[in-house]
Image (cartoon, helix red, strand yellow):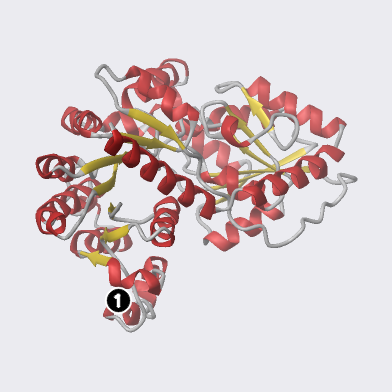
C-alpha cells in the first residue's frame, strides 16, 4: 500500500509515521511546508541567528527522495511571528496565519493527486484542518482517505469548556478555541464526513466523536510513543526540601491551570511549582498574578524541557480537554511520574497508583489529595518513577509508527477481500 503523508509542520507523531511508512516500504511521498536538508539554502540560512529556528525543520536525510515541500506560507508565518507583525498571522484572517498555512498546503496537495494516482498512490494520510481539498480530490480518484484527529472533536470541546466560561469567567480570555469561525468548524465536519478511517491517539479523543451528528467510519485508537529512555533516574530523598512540582504546556484554562494553582496554594511550605509555557493571551489578570507567585519559564528548547523534567519530582498535567498530551510520555521517559486527568491520554498510558496518578478533571481537591499522598509516602516518587520508565521502554516511537502502518495494511487487506 503506497501512502502519501501530508502535514505542513511535521510534529513528533507525524515524523514517527514517516519512519514507520519507510520501514514498511509504504511511503509514496511526504508533503510538507519547510523541509531542511544538508546543503540546501534553508540549511545554510539556519546558521544565521535570525533564522536559527529553521534548525528545528531539519529532517532525516533518508526522507529527502520522498519529500515535496512548498515553504512560502509557513516561512511567512515563522518570520512574521519572529518580528511580531501580528496582522499577518491574525487568527483565520492573516495571510500567514496557521489556518491559511494549512489551507494553502491542502490545496497544493490536492492539485498533485491526479498525477500521483497514475503512479500508484493508494492512500492519503492527512490531518485536521488540512485535509478537505485533499480528500475531495482523493474521493474523485478512488484514493483512500485516512484522517488523523490529533485533538478531540470541536463540538465536544465547546460543550466541556463552556462550563469553564460559566464557573471561571476570569480565565475566559485564555480559552481561544471559541474564536474559531463557523466556516472553520464546518470544514472540520466535512473532513470527518469524507474520511474512510480515522486515527486518534487516545480513548478520550475517540469518545469526543460521539458528539458528531453524522455517520463516522472506523475509529482506531493508537497512542503515540515515548521518547527513548537513555539513563536510569537518580532520586533524591524528600528530606529537608520541598516537593518540586512541574507543569509544561500552553498557559490556558483548557490545560486546567486554575485547578493546579488552587491545589498548590495550601502547600506553600511543602511544595514549589515551576510553570513552563507561553501565555495564550497577555492580559489575563488571574494568570499573570499566579505566575508572579511561582517560577515561570516562558520557553525552553526541547532538550532543556527534558532536563527540567528530570530535575522535578512530579509533573502535573490537569488538562480539561486534550487529544493526547506529549508531556506525559516525555516526563515518564525521564522517570518523572505524572498526575493527569481522564481527559488526556493518561488512561491509555498510566496504570493508576502504579506508575502515575489519574485524577478527576476540573478538581483542585483531587490534585491536593495526591500531593498529600506523596508528602506522606515520598518513596512513591521513586517507585512510580521507575515504573514509568519501565513502561516507556516498552513503547518507543517506532511502535506507534509500526502499529499505524499495520492497521492501515490490515484495513486495506480486509477491504480487498470483501
Q: Which quadrant of the figure contains the C terminus?
A: top left
Question: Would residue 281 be seen by someone viewing this image from the given angle?
Answer: no
Residue 263 rendering spot, x and y as whole percentages: 66, 28
Q: Which is nearer the eye, 70 or 318?
A: 70
Of residues 264 and 36, the one drawn nearer to the viewer in this rendering? 36
Q: Position of residue 184 (x, y in %)?
A: 20, 34
The 10 Å Cα crowd at callout 1, few under 14, some 14 to 19, many 20 or more, is some
Q: Is residue 300 left or right of residue 75?
A: right
On the image, which quarter does residue 11 sit in? bottom left
Point out the residue furthest to the right here. Answer: 239
Position above or below: 102 against 43? above
What x and y, as percent, mark residue 352? 70, 29
Image mark count: 1
> Which one is in front, 387 or 121?
121
Q: Residue drawn at (71%, 49%), measured in percent from left and top?
A: 389
Q: Against 279, is 377 above or below? A: above
Q: Secondary structure at mark 1?
A: helix
Q: Is residue 114 left or right of residue 303?
A: left
Q: Which residue is mark 1?
A: 42
Task: List the single residue furthest toward the front.
Answer: 417
Q: Position of residue 86 (x, y in %)?
A: 25, 52
Q: Quadrant of residue 121?
A: bottom left
Amino acid at each position: 500500500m503506497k501512502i502519501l503523508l501530508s502535514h505542513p509542520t511535521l510534529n513528533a507523531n507525524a515524523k514517527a509515521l514517516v519512519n514507520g511508512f519507510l520501514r514498511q516500504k509504504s511511503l509514496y511521498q511526504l508533503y510538507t511546508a519547510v523541509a531542511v536538508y544538508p546543503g540546501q539554502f534553508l540549511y545554510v540560512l539556519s546558521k544565521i541567528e535570525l533564522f536559527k529556528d529553521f534548525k528545528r525543520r531539519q529532517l532525516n536525510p533518508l526522507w529527502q527522495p520522498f519529500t515535496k515541500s512548498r515553504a512560502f506560507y509557513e516561512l511567512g508565518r515563522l518570520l512574521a511571528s519572529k518580528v511580531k507583525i501580528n496582522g499577518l498571522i491574525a487568527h483565520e484572517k492573516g495571510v500567514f496565519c496557521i489556518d491559511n498555512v494549512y489551507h494553502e498546503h491542502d490545496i497544493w496537495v490536492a492539485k498533485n493527486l491526479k498525477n500521483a494516482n497514475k503512479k500508484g498512490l493508494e492512500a492519503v494520510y492527512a490531518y485536521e484542518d488540512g485535509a478537505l481539498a485533499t480528500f475531495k480530490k482523493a474521493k474523485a480518484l478512488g484514493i483512500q482517505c485516512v484522517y488523523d484527529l490529533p485533538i478531540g472533536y470541536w463540538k465536544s470541546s465547546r460543550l466541556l469548556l463552556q462550563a469553564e466560561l460559566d464557573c471561571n469567567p476570569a480565565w475566559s480570555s485564555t480559552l481561544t478555541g471559541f474564536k474559531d469561525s463557523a466556516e472553520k468548524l464546518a470544514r472540520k465536519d466535512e473532513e470527518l464526513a469524507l474520511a474512510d478511517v480515522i486515527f486518534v491517539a487516545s480513548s478520550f479523543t475517540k469518545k469526543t466523536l460521539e458528539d458528531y451528528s453524522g455517520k463516522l467510519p472506523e475509529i482506531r485508537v493508537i497512542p503515540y510513543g515515548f521518547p527513548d529512555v537513555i539513563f536510569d533516574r537518580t532520586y533524591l530523598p524528600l528530606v529537608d526540601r520541598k516537593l518540586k512540582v512541574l507543569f509544561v504546556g500552553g498557559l490556558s484554562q483548557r490545560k486546567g491551570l486554575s485547578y493546579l494553582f488552587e491545589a498548590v496554594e495550601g502547600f506553600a511550605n511543602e511544595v514549589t511549582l515551576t510553570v513552563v509555557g507561553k501565555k495564550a493571551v497577555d492580559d489575563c489578570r488571574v494568570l499573570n498574578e499566579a505566575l508572579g507567585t511561582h517560577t515561570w519559564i516562558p520557553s525552553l528548547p526541547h532538550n532543556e524541557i527534558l532536563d527540567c523534567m528530570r530535575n522535578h519530582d512530579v509533573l502535573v498535567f490537569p488538562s480539561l480537554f486534550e487529544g493526547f498530551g506529549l508531556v506525559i510520555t516525555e516526563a515518564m521517559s525521564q522517570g518523572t511520574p505524572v498526575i493527569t486527568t481522564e481527559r488526556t491520554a493518561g488512561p491509555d498510558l498510566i496504570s493508576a497508583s502504579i506508575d502515575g496518578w489519574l485524577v478527576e478533571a476540573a478538581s483542585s481537591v483531587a490534585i491536593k489529595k495526591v500531593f498529600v499522598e506523596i508528602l506522606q509516602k515520598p518513596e512513591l516518587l521513586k517507585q512510580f518513577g521507575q515504573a514509568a520508565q519501565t513502561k516507556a521502554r516498552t513503547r518507543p516511537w517506532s511502535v506507534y509508527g509500526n502499529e499505524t502502518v499495520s492497521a492501515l495494511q490490515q484495513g486495506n487487506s480486509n477491504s480487498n477481500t470483501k
